[in-house]
Image (tube, rainbow, N blue to C red):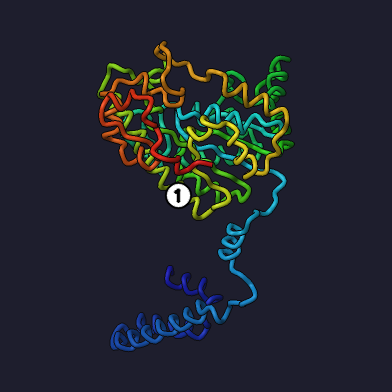
Amino acid sequence: MKIIMFFVKQIKRIRIRICVLIMICLILSYVLEIGLNVFCSSMFTTIVAAFRAADQTHLDPSNHFNENKKTNYETKASVMNTTTLPEYPTKFVLINTYMRSGSTIVGSLLGHHDKAFYFYEPLLKMQVFRYINGSKLCEYTRPVCRDGNGVRETSLRYISDIFNCKLRKHINKYNPTIHFNGGQLGPKWEAFQDCKSKKQSTDKCLGVMDKVCENASYRVIKSLRLSMMDTAYLLEKFPNLYVFQLVRDPRSILNSHIFTSWYPVELQNIPSITADVKTQCRRLRDDIRAGKMLTERYPKRVRIIQYEDIAIDVWIIKTLYQLIGVDKLLSMDDYVNKTMNRRFDSSKVIKQEPRFPRYFGYRDSLPFQIVKITQEHCDDVIQQLGFNIFQTEEQLRNPNISSILSRLPFEL
């Protein structure tokens, strides 16, 4: 019966006479049971040849291709290679990065724009010290991964819904309390705070925010728990999405990990530091590779950006404003200056007169042994990011030796 049903289903797609011949062959084989093996073999050989001929006709571009009409792929490629992208009424921005990478500052610079709706770390409550790497769920502080059991699909769906302003759909299930932290959610969330101050339910206040989100010209999300390659799905789904992969010198990231009170790595614990370094540099290595691939595919929509580039000259952020079409408002001038002067971290920083700018503070505060461990596991990443590798403690502490080799390879 399965064989008969198969051919019934196929009758609309292949020639009726071929189906009839096959049915006759099967019936005769069943009734007579002898002498028809050779006949059926020959019959099926003929039919397979007919199928192949039909397939060739179907796949032959000359039968379907209109020279004046571009394929969907070619149209996309053409769009990506033009100087400007199609205009969309609303643009999405995803900042993909790591803990202690300077992401709070960069997220604020992009997300606190008057026209932007900013969602700060939507996956925070789902996976605090884990990140998603394809189908795997990996530890943040040690190189250990396990099966993700669908968390990637759930997370990407969650981010998609935030971009589509469907805030209530997932928040009550995965993030029952909105994560407020020093005004980092941006000025648009004042409506939520005002709603909650009137003793309204979270669900009702999120309904208010759905409307606020829909009216924003730009929707910005900062995520610390996705791999860069996982953003390919979002780039394909949303043609108005821009993805910025934020990277930083791994020695600076480690320095901030160690001297941040809530991060589970301590200066005296060399094994935990080594595990943290291995994990961080594996992520950087993979994300830089993926970022380069996606930049080639979406040259107008994907950028690898270096925190040090922005820290050295904060107004380089204007390049990103221009890329996504944000008008720099006069009100942003004061905000940018305030942002760069604020202390965003809760660091236990060694109190001494710095010889280096804060973004290269590891050269003052990290023991050379720790710097050496980082360089041993991350030398390729450090060089890819254009930074100097210090062979001795004298070199590390010498302010006359530049932290940057010549120029930052991903500078804006």
Name the spot of residue 67 as percent of width and height, x first.
61, 77
Q: Which residue is mark 1?
A: 292
Name the spot of residue 224 as percent of width and height, x first.
48, 32
Name the spot of residue 293 as percent of width and height, x first.
45, 52
Provide the secondary structure element on which disc 1 rests: helix
Residue 290 visible to the viewer: yes
Q: Quadrant of residue 334?
A: top right
Q: Is residue 288 above or below residue 357?
A: below
Q: Quadrant of residue 132?
A: top left
Q: Is residue 275 left or right of residue 76?
A: left
Number of marks present in the image shown? 1
What quarter of the picture does the C terminus occupy? Answer: top right
Q: Amino acid at mark 1?
A: Lys
What quarter of the picture does the N terminus occupy? Answer: bottom left
- Decide which of 32, 138 is in the foreground and name it: 138
- Decide which of 381, 8 is in the foreground and name it: 381
Identified at 50% across, 76% down, the residue is 59
Name the spot of residue 148 as percent of width and height, x first.
40, 38
- Which residue is situated farthest in the top direction here? 351
Task: Report crowding for label 1: few under 14, some 14 to 19, many 20 or more residues within 10 A (C-alpha).
Answer: some
